[in-house]
Amino acid sequence: MNEFLIRRVAFGNFTVPSNVAGNTASVLSVTVNGAAIPKGAIVTGIKYFAAGAITNAANMGSATFNLYAGGQALATNNAVASVVFVQTAVYNHTIATAVGVYVTVGGPLVAAIQDTNSARTGVAFDADVYVEYLYCGNRDIA
């Protein structure tokens, strides 16, 4: 059985609000609006695009960035946020395994910026997220 349109792309956008000033939490998690990955999908690629201005980008310092679906990390956790998010530049985030990430739980996408200090003070931007994945809803009955 061949199901057409098996390759899909989840698209969403998230905003890091400037009111994180003084936030000393080690992880700032932001929901990616309108994007979710179903359980059983195989993630094959992740891309980010920040079209607008990034306020106080230097304050991201050495903060790391990752993307989660249902609590499961989809990409490597060592991407430096100030490298990932550069105005008008597309970033291709390396997924957690070279051949694809099997999504065991599924759920909405969540962007997490992690830092051990308050260097995120005044950082504000929004970014588009594209997650390429393979999924066949009829897999178990095929």
Image (cartoon, rainbow, N blue to C red):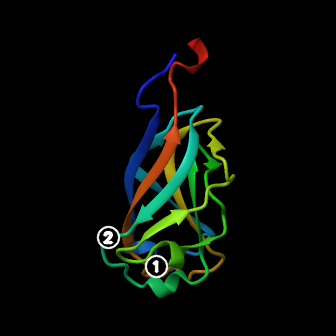
- Estimate the x, y position of residue 123 in percent, counting from the top left: 43, 78
Placement of 40 over or under 31, stated as above or below = above
Q: Which residue is mark 2?
A: 51
Q: Residue at x 57, y 51 (%)?
A: 68
Locate residue 93, reporting x and y percent: 55, 62
Image location of residue 130, percent across then percent down: 43, 53
Residue at x 42%, y 26% (from the top left corner) = 4
Q: CA distance from mark 1 to mark 2?
A: 23 Å
Secondary element at tag 2: loop
Frontmost residue, 7 versus 71:
7
In which quadrant of the rendered image does the C terminus lie?
top right
Q: In the rendered image, which quarter is residue 102 located in?
A: top right
The amino acid beneath tag 1 is Ala
Residue at image position (50%, 85%) is 59
Q: Residue furthest front?
A: 2
Image coordinates for residue 11, horizontal then vertical, percent: 38, 49
Q: Label 2: how many residues lie within 10 Å, few (<14), some (14-19) or many (20+)? A: some
Label 1 belongs to which residue?
A: 21
Q: Secondary structure at mark 1?
A: loop
Quarter-wise, where is residue 113 in the image?
bottom right
Left or right: where does residue 2 sit relative to residue 118? left
How many marks overall? 2
The residue positioned 62% from the left and 35% from the top of the image is 105
Rendered image quadrant of residue 5: top left
- Of 26 and 32, nearer the camera is 32
Bin the neighbour count of mark 1 within 10 Å (Cα to Cα): few under 14, some 14-19, many 20 and up: some
* CB within 8 Å, label 1 to label 2: no
Q: Amino acid at mark 2?
A: Ala
- The disc label shown at residue 135, or none: none
Looking at marks 1 and 2 on the same chain, the residue that comes earlier in the sequence is marked by 1
Report the front residue among 120 and 47: 47
